[in-house]
């Protein structure tokens, strides 16, 4: 079994303490418009953009294999933790 591809780059735009927009670069593809929501325990959940079909049902525009989704979620969690740290200015 092949390992899930690791994200090459994660860009995070934090909108609120519990909400951010994420762009992810995986080998061979860039994904953007992903919403990241953080609960009170600090767990991050990714929400992918959807489109509405002719039948009125919503369908995701993208999906990731479980191993890749876990790797991306870990990378987003790490990036968000780093972005939330107070910056250490030079004195």
Image (cartoon, grey):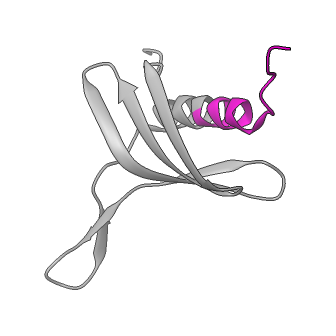
Where residue 54 appears, as percent x and y from the top left, is 13, 81
Let me know if residue 88 is in the magenta part.
yes
Q: Is residue 68 left or right of residue 56?
A: right
In the rendered image, the residue lying farthest to the left is: 54
Q: In the rendered view, would you say 90 is above or below 16?
A: above
Q: Quadrant of the C terminus?
A: top right
The magenta-colored residue range is 76-91
User: Is 26 in front, or is 81?
Assistant: 81
Where residue 74 appears, as percent x and y from the top left, is 63, 31
Residue 71 position by quadrant: top right
| Residue found at x 79% / y 33% | 85
Q: Quadrant of the N terminus?
A: top left
Q: In the rendered view, would you say 35 is above or below 57?
A: above
| Residue found at x 77% / y 28% | 87
Where residue 70 appears, as percent x and y from the top left, is 57, 35
Q: Is residue 60 left or right of residue 13?
A: left
Q: Is residue 32 left or right of residue 69?
A: left
In the rendered image, the residue lying farthest to the front is: 91
Where residue 4 appears, as percent x and y from the top left, is 46, 21
Residue 56 position by quadrant: bottom left
| Residue found at x 31% / y 49% | 62
Q: How many marks?
A: 0
In the rendered image, the residue lying farthest to the bottom is: 56
Let me know if residue 11 is in the magenta part.
no
């Amino acid at each position: 079994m092949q390992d899930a591809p690791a994200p090459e780059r994660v860009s995070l735009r934090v909108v609120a303490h519990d909400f951010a927009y994420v762009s992810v670069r995986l080998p061979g593809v860039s994904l953007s418009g992903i919403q990241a929501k953080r609960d009170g325990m600090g767990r991050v959940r990714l929400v992918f953009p959807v489109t509405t079909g002719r039948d009125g049902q919503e369908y995701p525009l993208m999906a990731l294999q479980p191993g890749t989704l876990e790797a991306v979620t870990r990378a987003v969690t790490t990036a968000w933790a780093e972005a939330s740290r107070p910056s250490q200015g030079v004195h």
